Image (cartoon, rainbow, N blue to C red):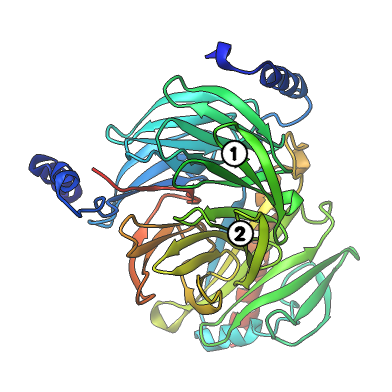
Amino acid sequence: MTRSMPKVLLAAIALVALALPYAARAHGPTRQKITESIEINAPPEKVWAAIADFHDMSWLPGVAKTNGDGGNEPDAAKRQLVLDSGATIDESLYKYDPAERTYSYRIEQVDVKVLPVTNYSATIAVLPADGGKSKVEWRGAFYRGYPNNNPPPELNDEAAIAAVSKIYRAGLESLKKKIEAGK
Amino acid sequence: MKAEAAAAMRAALGVAALCAAALGCTRAEAAEAFITDQSGDEVSVLDLTSQSIVARIPVSGKPAGIAMAPDGKTAYVTSTEGQYVSVIDTASRKVISKIAMPDTPLGIAADPAGRFIYVAGFYKPLLYKIDVSTRAIVAAVEVGASPSGVAVALDGAMIVSADRDDNQISIIDAKTFTRKSTVKAGTHPFGVTIDAQGARAYTANVESNDVSVIDLKSAQLFATVPTGKRPYAVALAKGKGFVTDQYGGTVSVFDLETLKPLKRISVGEYPEGIETSADGKSVYVVNWFSNEVWAINADTLAVTAKMPAGDGPRAFGTFLRESL
C-alpha cells in the first residue's frame, strides 16, 4: 500500500513521528466522573432546606465565606467560595430544581493548584431513602488539571479524582453531622 | 439468552436476505447498538429489541469514537488514550485488528461504499484516509485545529471535519482527498452531521450553545439554531434535528425547514452520542454520566426506551448496526 502513498504524505508522517516524543504521545485526557453519597437521618425536605441556598456553602469544611449574587436563578447566579487559605473558586449555577431537590453548577475559575481539575461541573441532589431518611448524592464530571499529554503527578487523572472525592466526602459528612445534631 | 435466540431465529429465517430481495423493503430496523464505554474500556453491544447488553468487547485505551461500516459487519473504534483504531468484527464480537495511528484519534467516519474510513488526529490537524482492505493509511489532509467530529456525505464524495479549536469546518473532496474550503461555525464545534441530500452540515457548538447550519454547495454559514447547554452532536430524523445537550441533560429538537426550536426533551445525564435508526423512526441517545441509552420516537418525541450501557458511554459517531 505504501507505493500508492504520495511522497508528501510519507514526509508528513515522518515529521509526525519525529514530533512524537514531546508532543501527543497518545494520552489525551479523558473526562472523569465520580459520585459520592451519604444517608442522613432526616426527611428530604429538611436536608434540602440545608443546602438549597446556592450562596450558602457554610456546610462545606474549608470554606471561610461565600460571596455572590443572582439568587438561585440558573444562568444568573454566581458565587465565589473563599477558602480558609484565602484561595477562591468561582462557580455558576446552570440548573435548579427545588421540586426534584437538585441543582447543578460549574466552576468558572479555579487555580489548578487549589483544585487540580478543568471543565468541572457538578450536581447535588437530595433523594428520599427508606424509613423517612434521605440520601444526598454529589456527582462531579471533570478533566484533570493538565490538559495535554504526560501530566505531572499532581495534575493527573488520579490527582483530580482524589481531590474532588475528598471534598465531597468531607462536605457530605459535615452536612450529615450538622443536620442530625440539629434535630 | 432471549436476544441470542431472537438473533438466531432471524438468521435462520433469512430475514435480512428476504428483506434485501423484496421490493420496496428498506434496510432492517436498527437491531444493535455498539457503545464505546470509555471509562469501562470496552464496547458494549446493546440488543435494541430485548433492550439488554448481549456482549462486552474489551477495547483498551479509553474508546470514544466509532464508525459502523455500511454493511454492519465491522465497527471501527478510536481510543483517546491509545494511538490506534480497533477493528471489531460485529458478528463474532471480537477485536480482529488494530490500526496504528501517528496521532491520538477521536472522530471517525466510514465511507458509504465501504472502502475507506476517515480518522481525525486530534493533536496534529490531519485527517487520515485508511483503506479498510489493507488497514493502512493511504493519505492525509490538513484540517483545522483539534478536529473532532467527521462526517461523510451519503454519495461518498464529500467529507467534513469539525475543527473545534478553529471554530470552523473543513470540507474535503473525497476523491482527490484535498481540502476545498473552510466555513466558520459557532464556538468549538464538536459533532458534525451531513443530511441525506449532502446539502447541509450541522455542527453542535459546545461553547456557543447552538448549532451551525452550513450550506455545503456554497460553503456558507446558512443559519444558527439555539440549543440547550453544551451541545455535543446532532442527529437528523423526520424533518427534525436532534441535539444532545451535555450540561442540559436534554435533547434539543428543531425543525429542519424553519430552523425553529421545537422542544427540549429531558434525557439521562450528560447525553453525548446520538444517531437515527435506518428507518428514521427512532433516535438513540447515549448518556455518559448515567450509563444509559435512551430511545426517542422521532414523530411523537416521546421517550420510548431506557436501556443500560457500560461505564462512561460516549458513542461519538455511528454506532447502530442496522442489518443482520
Query: Which quadrant holds residue B145?
Result: top right
Mark 2 highlights which residue? B215
Q: Is residue B118 above or below residue B237?
A: above
Q: Is residue B98 above or below residue B74?
A: above
Q: Residue at x 60, y 67 (%)?
A: B247
- Judging from the image, mark 1 belongs to the subunit labelled B
Give, as a three-letter code, the residue at label 1: Asp
Q: Is residue A165 above or below residue B296?
A: above
User: Given the current orientation, which residue lies at the most extreme top position?
Assistant: A3
Q: Residues within 10 Å of mark 2 (few under 14, many from 20)?
A: some
The percent coordinates of residue B35 (x first, y second) are: 42, 47
The percent coordinates of residue B166 (x first, y second) are: 76, 50
Q: Residue at x 70, y 53 (%)?
A: B183
Element assignment for label 1: strand
Query: Which quadrant holds residue A28?
Result: top right
Dot placed on the residue nearer the N-terminal end, 2 or 1: 1
User: Given the current orientation, which residue lies at the most extreme right position?
Assistant: A86
- Judging from the image, mark 2 belongs to the subunit labelled B
**In screen coordinates, is B286 left or right of A75?**
left
- Label of residue B173 in the image: 1
Q: Residue at x 47, y 67 (%)?
A: B268
User: Given the current orientation, which residue lies at the most extreme front position?
Assistant: B218
Q: How many marks?
A: 2
Element assignment for label 2: strand
**In screen coordinates, is B113 left or right of A46?**
left
The percent coordinates of residue B281 (x first, y second) are: 32, 65
Looking at the picture, tell me which residue is in the foreground, A71 or B66.
Answer: B66
Q: Quadrant of the C terminus of chain A?
A: bottom right
Cα distance in 3D space between marks 2 and 1: 15 Å
